[in-house]
Structures are given as structure tokens and as C-alpha cells.
Amino acid sequence: MTTPFPLLRLPHLVLMPILEQMDFMERIALSIYSKRARKFLKLLKMKCEHINLRLEDNRVEMKVFFDNSEELKVDMYTDRYKIDLKYGNDHIFWWSGTLSPMDYVLPIMDVTHCNSIKKLTIPKLSTHNPKYDALIPLLTKLPKIDEVIVEDTTSWSFSPESPLLKVLRIIFPVTSAVTISGHIRKPNYLRETFKGNFDAVSVSFYLNIDERFSLNDWKFTNAKTLKLAGPAFEVENLNRYFKLWMKKKCNPRLENLIVRTRESVTKDLLLKGLNAVQVPIRTDRSLGVLGCIKQYHSDEKITWEFDITRADGKIATISISNHGLVCFYVSPFRQNQSSFIRAFSSFSSFYNSCIEHFK
């Protein structure tokens, strides 16, 4: 019978060199099973670049990326309590007993100084008894998620009886961006997503030829950047949306909007009643200026640009590409020239009156 060695009772000056000599997987294991050890291991500054999570029916896949191009992969099975680890070229099977995914994800985030999950991916949802209940304790403890990606969804995925909605309602309050792609046949199922205070929302729809998304389905969006891809949007609805924006009756947070419609975009129909002013196409205004939004075609380019002015003097630019992509972005510092002249005139009058007073 061997006597356990009281490692954590050693003096700090003795303990730290021992921890430094441990290999990476020994440190990870120690950080999971001991909160006290984790405090010391954090002093070693095992920082990662970012962490991604992927939720399957009965598995959580965790990938930890380091700046030395190494990757720690942890597969946690919720139905068998089996942990599968791989770091670099080392593949280890780890049978953990009764620990839940939360008991692995959060300690690893802590010891690698990671404050948020970069991507949380939810793959195609199975309609046959999806097992999300075991993941609820983990999801409620995640501090921050940069982007939630929902892949290949169906209308049932967002229906009131779907377990996915319960998961999304848990993670949306700590999420910055949402990306959804799939076959959504009932637009009202996505209204809860559109109303969120996200930095970015990207939705790709695959609908039948006779299905469309009306303006009422997305005019109340609250995201700073909104991307709507798919042949479900009409030019008339875009025109109506821009008119609402000019009257300050929709999304005051909006900075970028990208929409691809099913029909060819004509500037006369798109700009009807907007009092738009054509501006020269700036070479630095590419489709990539909208953050992570990428071009759809290699030969896509902007063919027209027009400025419209909101009631408060805020200016936005509408761009039309040669493939029918409509980009709308609000200029953060530009204002109406006449408003600027009025403000300058008022200031000038005040300045002149002060000069006369002191004379």
C-alpha cells in the first residue's frame, strides 16, 4: 500500500518548480481535479489563443488552440462519462468516472486564462430524442460566447416544442454574434433571434420558390451587423426598410446590413422615394469592409453607391453589386452638410458677439 504524497502542502518555492516539470496533460488533469492546484497552475501562464465548443447529441467537443500551433482536443460523452483527449500527436483515452462536461470545460478555460468561447457550434439537430439536458449545467455557466453557429436547421428546430430553443435562450444573453443556416419555413420562429442585442446576426435561408420573408419578419432586428442571405427577400421590402430607417423607426443600433434577394436589383426600384444621392465608388469600400462578411462571387464588385440621410442628419451608404447584393452601412462620423453649416453659423455668430462685447 502506497501513501499519497501531499504535493499541494509543499512550500510555494518547492511546489512551483515541480509543477513546471510536469508535462502539459498532467497539468490539465491536476487543474480539473483540484481547485487549489489550479490556483498555482495559473501562475505558469498556460495561455491559449481561443477555445471552440461543438455540441452533439451525446458529446461535447472542445478544442483549445495555442500560439505554438498545438491543439488540445477533448471529447466529453454525456451518456458514458468517457473522456477522449488528444494533444498534438499524443492520443490519450481517459475514463473519468462521474464528472460532467462542466467539470472539464470550465477548469480548462480557467487554467488557460480563456474568458470566452470563440465559437459554440450546434450541428444539425436530430428529431429523435436530442440529449441536451446533460449540457444545461455547462451552458448556464459559460461566461461569454463570441459566436453561436447553428448549422443546417429545419423549421422544427426553432418551433416551440424543439429543445433547441431552450438551449438558445440560455446562451443568447452571453452571446455576441449568431449565425444560422438552414430550411426555415416559418419566419416568425426566428423573431426571438432577431430581437436580441447582438453585435452581428447572419441568417441564410433555403426556401421554396413560392416562399418569402416579409418585412414584418425582420424589420425589428436589433443587431449592429445584419446579414440576410437567400432568395427570400424582395427589393420592395428593402426600400420600405430604408424609409423606416430614415424616419428613425427601426433599429437605431444598425451599422451594416447585407441582403441578397431572389430578383435582380434595379436602383430605381430600390431607391424609390429615398432622395438618394449618387456618390463616387470609393476603392477602399469593398465588401470585406463589413467585418467577417465575405464576397459571394470571386468577380463580385460594387457598381453603384448612393447616400441617404436620416431625419437627424445621419448618413448611410447603399451599395449595389453586379450580382445583386445590396450593402447598407451607416457612416459613424459623417453628418448632413447643411446641418453642419447651420451649426457652424451658430457658433460663428456666438463667437462674433463675444468679440463685440469685449470691444
Image (cartoon, rainbow, N blue to C red):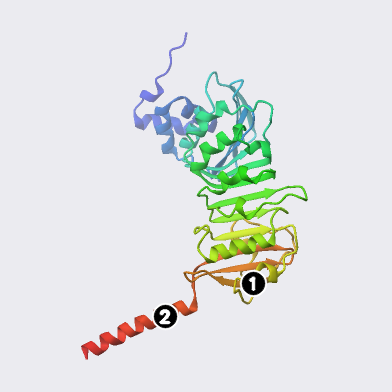
| Residue that badge 2 annotates | 342
| Residue that badge 1 annotates | 305
Q: Residue furthest right?
A: 209
Tag count: 2
Q: Is residue 287 above or below residue 350?
A: above
Question: Who is closer to the viewer here, 192 or 95?
Answer: 192
Rendering coords of residue 194 (x, y %): 57, 48
Q: Is residue 256 above or below residue 268?
A: above
Q: Quadrant of residue 246?
A: bottom right
Q: Upstream in the sequence, badge 1 or badge 2?
A: 1
Q: Dot 2: few (<14), some (14–19), or many (≥20) neighbours within 10 Å?
A: few
Q: Residue at x 50, y 49 (%)?
A: 197
Amino acid type assigned to the residue bearing label 1 in the image: Glu
Q: Gap in Å between the C-alphas at discs 1 and 2?
A: 27 Å
Identify the image quadrant of the C terminus.
Answer: bottom left
Amino acid type assigned to the residue bearing label 2 in the image: Arg
Determine if residue 189 is in view. Answer: yes
Determine if residue 289 is in view. Answer: no
Q: Residue furthest bottom?
A: 359
Q: Secondary structure at mark 2?
A: helix
Question: Who is closer to the viewer here, 179 or 276?
Answer: 276
Q: Left or right? Give the position of 51 relative to 299.
A: left
Q: Secondary structure at mark 1?
A: strand
